[in-house]
Amino acid sequence: MADESNKVVAEVRDSFGKGAARKIRAAGKIPAVIYGHGTDPVHITVPAHQVGLLLRKANAVLDLDIDGTSQLTLVKDVQKDPVLQIIEHLDLLVIRRGEKVQVEVPVHVEGEPFSGTIAVLDIPTIKLEVEATHIPERIVIDVTDAEEGTQYHAKDFALPAGAVLAEDEDLLILAVVVPAAARAEEEETESAEEAGESAAAESAE
């Protein structure tokens, strides 16, 4: 949700290319482009440290101040250096208050499933259609004491008010299973017990 902490002072830029981008980053800023709603792309720079902190939250909304004009934007793409993990460029989508957007919201698993099992997250996000300024930080699923074979599909998640599922409702998000290593050990134990019983039976004969 956009609030005072999301206010970012941006500067319009007119220099492009790798060399210009390096100078921008060396000055503690990030090059970015704003687009959407039929507007011409606007190339800007934003303060790297402040925006880097805001990007810790998925689907960050930035309330940009561009030459005194406020512009709400949704962070759509973050390009990072694959080695240094430095943010190299941002794609920002123009949004309006009350407008609905489709976003991938992280799934957060709480609780511990039944002893001997683990919760395996097949898909780490769930696609929702929500108001652009009311995007939830995460969708929580509680797996406390869930037994082996329990499955959670997209339709099983409790969504915040105003949010609508934008996925196939039968999409498998999470499953509770017995770890492969534990399963193999269990089968090995069962085989050994069966072999022992068979040997005992033969001896009795």
Image (cartoon, rainbow, N blue to C red):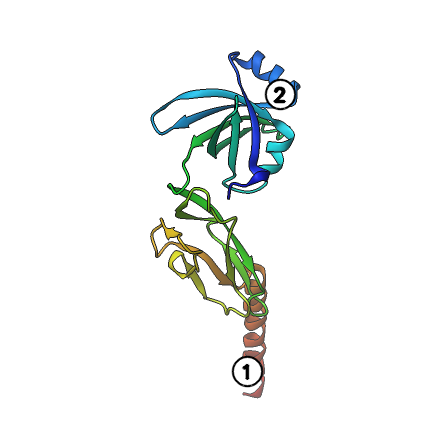
Q: In which quarter of the image is residue 28?
A: top right
Above or below, comparing residue 69 to residue 112 in the picture: above
Say which quadrant the C terminus sits in.
Answer: bottom right
Question: Percent position (x, y) of residue 120?
Answer: 51, 56
Where disc 2 sits, the SS reads: helix
Q: Residue 202 carries which label?
A: 1
The earlier-in-sequence mark between 2 and 1 is 2
Question: Percent position (x, y) of residue 104?
Answer: 44, 44
Name the residue tied to disc 2: 25
**Of the pair 111 and 121, the residue shown nearer to us:** 111
Above or below, comparing residue 200 to residue 166 in the picture: below
**Of the pair 27 and 205, the residue shown nearer to us:** 27
The residue depicted at 49 percent of the width and 67 percent of the height is: 148
Relative side of 42 to 38, left or right = right
Disc 1 residue type (three-letter): Glu
Question: Percent position (x, y) of residue 73?
Answer: 47, 33
Around disc 1, counting alpha carbons within 10 Å, would you say few (fewer than 14), some (14 to 19), or many (20 or more)?
A: few
How many numbered tags mark residues here? Answer: 2
Q: Which mark is residue 148?
A: none
Disc 2 residue type (three-letter): Arg
Around disc 2, counting alpha carbons within 10 Å, would you say few (fewer than 14), some (14 to 19), or many (20 or more)?
A: some
The residue depicted at 65 percent of the width and 19 percent of the height is: 27
The residue depicted at 55 percent of the width and 24 percent of the height is: 10
User: Marks 2 and 1, how far apart in space?
Assistant: 78 Å
Question: Percent position (x, y) of residue 4?
Answer: 58, 39
